[in-house]
Amino acid sequence: MESTKIIKHVDRLGRFKLPTEWLNMYDIKPNSKVKLTRGMARIVVEPVEHKCIFCLSSENIHTFKDKFICNNCSKEIKELKK
Ligand SMILES: [Zn+2]
C-alpha cells in the first residue's frame, strides 16, 4: 500500500490539524484520544480504541457524560432504574 503524504503548517503552540478525511477514515472523533509514538525519524499517530468503561467491549460504543459505554451496559443500567 502506497502511503499518502501531506505537508501541514505547525502553529506557534506546536499544533496542526489532521485532514478531516483522515480523521473520518480512522474513526477519530472530536475529544477522543490518540496515541503518539516517537520513532527515529517519524511520529506515528494511532487512534485509541474506544472501550466501554464497564465491560471493556469495543462494539456499539457511544458516549455518556464524556465516558464510553456500550449499548448492552446502557440497557442494563436502564433496567436497574425500573
Ligand atoms: Zn459495556
Image (cartoon, helix red, strand yellow):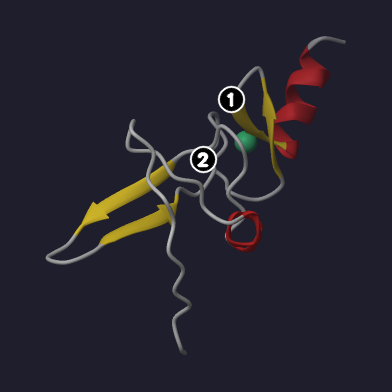
Percent across and percent down for residue 37 are: 25, 54
The image quadrant that residue 32 belongs to is: top right
The image quadrant that residue 13 belongs to is: top left
Question: Can you say whether 71 is above or below 47 in the image?
Answer: above
Percent across and percent down for residue 21 are: 65, 61
Which part of the image, by quadrant, shows the C terminus? top right
* 65 or 58: nearer the viewer: 65
The image quadrant that residue 62 belongs to is: top right
Question: Can you say whether 27 is above or below 69 in the image?
Answer: below
Q: Which residue is mark 1?
A: 67
* 42 or 37: nearer the viewer: 42
Q: Residue at x 23, y 64 (%)?
A: 42
Say what secondary structure mark 1 lies in.
strand
Label 2 Cα neighbours within 10 Å, binned few <14 / some 14-19 / many ≥20: few
Q: Which mark is residue 3?
A: none
Percent across and percent down for residue 38 are: 20, 55
Q: Earlier in the sequence, mark 1 or mark 2?
A: 2
Look at the numbered discs 1 and 2 and tell me whether their residues touch, using CB distance below 8 Å: no
Q: Nearer the viewer, mark 1 or mark 2?
A: 1
Say what secondary structure mark 2 lies in.
loop
Q: Residue at x 61, y 37 (%)?
A: 30
Quarter of the rendered image showing ligand 1:
top right
As drawn, the residue found furthest toward the bottom would be 1
Q: Residue at x 62, y 43 (%)?
A: 29
Percent across and percent down for residue 54 are: 55, 29
Q: How many marks?
A: 2
Asked if disc 2 is less than 8 Å from ligand 1, the answer is yes
Q: CA distance from mark 1 to mark 2?
A: 12 Å
The kind of residue tagged 1 is Lys
Q: Which residue is mark 2?
A: 56
